Amino acid sequence: MAVLLEFSLFALPFLAYLLWWRVAGRKPGHEPSRRIVVLAAIGVVCGVAGAIYYGLSRSFERGERYVPARIEGGVITPGEGVSR
C-alpha cells in the first residue's frame, strides 16, 4: 500500500502536466496564463525556502558527530548529534 501511495505522489505532477497538455496544449500559440506561472514560481520559491530552513534547523553544531538510530531494550532510540 505504501509503495502505491509513493508512486502516485511521484506520478501526480506528470499526470497534471499531461492533463494540461491534452486540454490546452493542442491550441496553437496557447501558453499558460500569467497567474499560473506566478503561482508556480511562488510554489518553487516556497519549496526552496522550506528546504533551506529545514536544512539549517536540523544541522549539527561544529564538532558534533552523528550517532545513528539504535535499538535499546526493545525501544528505538533516534539518531542524534553528540559532542566529540
Image (spheres, rainbow, N blue to C red):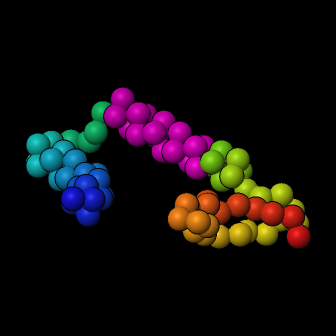
- The reply to whether residue 59 is in sight is yes
Compared to residue 81, the image places residue 55 above or below, namely: above
In the picture, the quarter occupied by the C terminus is: bottom right
> Does the stretch in magenta take in 70?
no
The residue shown at (58%, 50%) is 51
In the picture, the quarter occupied by the N terminus is: bottom left
Between residues 54 and 11, which one lies in front from this camera angle?
54
Q: Quadrant of residue 72?
A: bottom right
> In x, y percent, where is residue 8?
23, 55
Q: Which residue reaches farthest front?
A: 73
Between residues 38 and 72, which one lies in front from this camera angle?
72
Q: Which contiguous range is marked in magenta?
A: 35-51
The residue shown at (51%, 45%) is 47
> In x, y percent, where is residue 45?
54, 42
Compared to residue 63, the image places residue 48 above or below, namely: above
- The reply to whether residue 69 is in sight is no
The residue shown at (29%, 53%) is 9
Compared to residue 47, the image places residue 64 above or below, namely: below
